[in-house]
Image (spheres, helix red, strand yellow):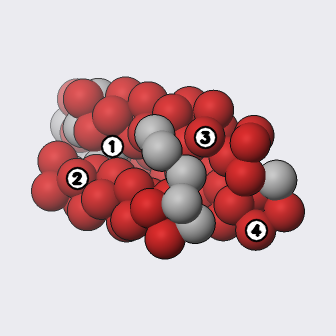
Amino acid sequence: MPITHSAAKHIRADKKKRLRNQAAISELHTLVKKLRTLVKEDPSKAKEFARFTIKRIDKAASNGIVPRKRSDRKKARITSLLQKAKIQL
């Protein structure tokens, strides 16, 4: 139980931030999964979708939702996936 009014306010704000962050992280997972299936099924669309996915990962990192090194690792894995499929980014 929060002691002060400001502590209660922080709890409410943290709950909103947590929900917003969880939604953003979930979106990133979904985008990466869709990209993996696109690479297998339709390589021509995969290039454009990869750029969109990388842009969203960068946006999440700049907002502090995802740590910078994690975003770099995800982007590196995406580019290596595209290189294995012979798709130039």
Q: Is residue 79 above or below residue 59?
A: below
Q: Nearer the viewer, mark 1 or mark 4?
A: 4
Left or right of 83: which side holds 5?
Answer: left
Residue 19 as seen in the image, left or right of residue 39: left
Residue designated by label 4: 40
> Which one is closest to the eye, mark 4 or mark 2?
4
Q: CA distance from mark 1 to mark 2?
A: 13 Å
Mark 1 secondary-structure assignment: loop
Whether residue 15 is visible to the viewer of this picture, yes or no, is: no
Q: Residue at x 68, y 46 (%)?
A: 46
Residue at 69% across / 60% down in the picture? 39
| Among the two numbered marks 1 and 3 on one chain, the one whose residue lies closer to the N terminus | 3
Where 62 sits versus 75, above or below?
A: above
Is label 3 or label 2 in front?
3
Tell me if I can see residue 66 in this picture: yes
Residue lying at the far front of the rendered structure: 86
Gap in angstroms between the C-alphas marked 1 and 4 = 29 Å
Mark number, residue 47: 3
Q: Which mark identifies residue 72?
A: 2
Q: From mark 1 to mark 3, how far is it between C-alphas? A: 25 Å
The spot of residue 89 in percent (x, y) is: 46, 40
Disc on the earlier residue, 1 or 2: 1
Residue at left 56%, top 31%?
52
Q: Quadrant of residue 48?
A: top right
**Which badge, 1 or 4, comes first in the chain's sequence?**
4
First of labels 4, 2 by sequence position:
4
Q: Which residue is mark 1?
A: 65
